[in-house]
Image: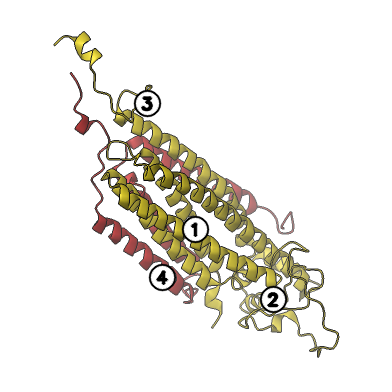
């Protein structure tokens, strides 16, 4: 039976222009928030809290771009696997590298 | 209708390559290929982020001091410029899916304009670093002759330098990397928050040693130039990709049946945007809260 040409390609009618503009607004607000929060001293929570907040905002922005601009949200499981695996590998790289550096004695290859 | 007859007259989409069964299979294969490429790009930038993580966790104060000499206004502006370009890129894909050739062309041109603005701002920033002796390689900074008649101020110890003062142009006859301010190291010493590496890495003879501090500030600037430089290279490649896309979209190659080249170029463009989303807070916004 001949295939119906209307249904053979991936569906792509999930995003509309208002939705794109909504994601865009979130990204702009995130950028301004990052800038503003960096000028506030959050060290009273714990030292380095500023960095944690900055990274949380950056991850949120990244999630918005990936899920909606890059259409990962509507992608097959295989694409999700590639995305998650790449971050998992990067986490392994960070974890194993720091496991080494954090356990060195002071003065042993410190530079 | 026999199977043979339908084989002879099987429907064949114009954009379908011979090796694929149908458009869905072709689209999934193209997507997974692009995503695996992006996965290796994540690892590629991840190596640099690892280097950054190692040094920053050891010498947070030198990194904060160095970061305060980057212009967060230009960095923030560039973040917004890239986000707008990501929006226009997403809309390019949207209009390709709607088979709207004219809007595709307009959106690609807008994306290219914003990409070019980003590179222009980057050029302004790099020029600024060149003028202020912040390029971490000797000889690559602006050479400024020492003025013999100038009134010489008595040299202040490095921890009394005002870190909020705007960067000045100092005599630099050999175009070397210049750094005179260790006030953040002093602040960390007074508040007793120096890391073990910092206690070892900033001092000689019990005193803060500006040369040792400068060496670590310099590492920050190496990372800054390599990371933003590599990112800028990706932008330039992206602009090349956009030029090709503009040409093919102009010819009307893309429609709701066949738009994968637009979608894949979009993935690349958004990836480059995501890298900047991380570079901006990690490079430009460290230790801003120390400046009151």
Q: In this view, does A44 lie above or below A22?
A: below
Q: Give the Cα distance between marks 2 and 1.
A: 28 Å
Whether residue B111 is visible: yes
Q: What chain does badge 3 belong to? A: B
Q: In this view, does A83 lie above or below A18?
A: above
Viewer-proximal residue, A100 or B20? B20
Residue named by callout 3? B17
Label 2 Cα crowd, 10 Å radius (few <14 / some 14-19 / many 20+): many
Mark toward the viewer: 2 or 3? 3
Residue named by callout 1? B276
Q: Earlier along the polypeptide chain: callout 2 or callout 3?
A: 3
The hue used for chain B is yellow
Q: Tell me, for residue B267, which label it has, or none.
A: none
Residue B272 in percent (x, y) is at 48, 52
Residue A77 in percent (x, y) is at 33, 36
Q: Earlier along the polypeptide chain: callout 1 or callout 3?
A: 3
In this image, B107 relative to B2: left or right?
right
Looking at the rendered structure, whether the residues under marks 1 and 3 are on a common chain is answered as yes
In this image, B227 relative to B273: left or right?
right
Question: Which residue is found at the position 42% from the left and 47% from the top?
Answer: B246
Task: Give the structural element (helix, strand or loop) at label 1.
Answer: helix
Q: Tell me, for residue B182, which label it has, or none.
A: 2
- Tell me the red chain: A
Mark toward the viewer: 4 or 3? 3
Which image quarter: residue B260? top left
Question: Which residue is found at the position 54% from the left and 44% from the top?
Answer: B43
Task: Give the structural element (helix, strand or loop) at label 3.
Answer: loop
């Amino acid at each position: 039976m001949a295939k119906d040409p209307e249904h053979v390609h991936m569906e792509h009618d999930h995003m509309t222009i208002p939705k794109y503009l909504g994601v865009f607004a979130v990204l702009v607000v995130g950028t301004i928030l990052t800038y503003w929060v960096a000028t506030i001293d959050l060290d009273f929570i714990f030292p380095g809290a500023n960095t944690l907040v900055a990274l949380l905002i950056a991850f949120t922005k990244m999630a918005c771009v990936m899920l909606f601009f890059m259409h990962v949200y509507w992608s097959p499981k295989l694409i999700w696997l590639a995305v998650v695996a790449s971050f998992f590998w990067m986490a392994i790289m960070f974890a194993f590298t720091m496991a080494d550096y954090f356990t060195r004695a002071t003065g042993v290859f410190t530079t | 209708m026999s199977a043979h007859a339908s084989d002879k007259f099987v429907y064949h989409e114009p954009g379908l390559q011979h090796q694929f069964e149908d458009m869905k299979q072709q689209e999934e294969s193209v997507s997974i290929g692009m995503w695996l490429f992006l996965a290796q790009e994540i690892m590629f930038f991840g190596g640099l982020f690892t280097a950054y993580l190692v040094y920053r966790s050891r010498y947070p104060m030198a990194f904060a001091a160095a970061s305060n000499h980057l212009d967060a206004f230009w960095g923030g502006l560039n973040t917004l410029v890239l986000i707008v370009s990501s929006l226009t890129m997403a809309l390019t894909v949207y209009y390709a899916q709607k088979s709207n050739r004219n809007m595709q062309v307009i959106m690609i041109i807008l994306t290219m304009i914003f990409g070019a603005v980003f590179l222009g701002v980057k050029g302004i920033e790099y020029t600024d670093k060149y003028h202020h002796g912040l390029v971490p390689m000797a000889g690559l900074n602006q050479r400024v002759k020492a003025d013999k008649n100038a009134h010489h101020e008595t040299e202040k110890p490095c921890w009394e330098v005002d870190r909020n003062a705007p960067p000045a142009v100092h005599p630099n006859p050999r175009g070397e990397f210049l750094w005179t301010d260790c006030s953040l190291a002093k602040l960390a010493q007074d508040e007793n928050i120096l890391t073990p590496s910092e206690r070892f890495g900033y001092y000689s003879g019990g005193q803060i040693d500006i040369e040792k501090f400068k060496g670590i500030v310099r590492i920050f600037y190496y990372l800054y130039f390599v990371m933003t430089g590599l990112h800028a290279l990706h932008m330039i490649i992206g602009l090349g990709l956009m030029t090709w896309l503009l040409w093919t979209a102009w010819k009307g190659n893309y429609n709701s049946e066949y738009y994968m080249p637009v979608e894949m170029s979009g993935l690349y463009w958004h990836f480059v945007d995501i890298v900047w989303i991380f570079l901006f807070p990690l490079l430009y916004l460290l230790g801003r809260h120390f400046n009151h």
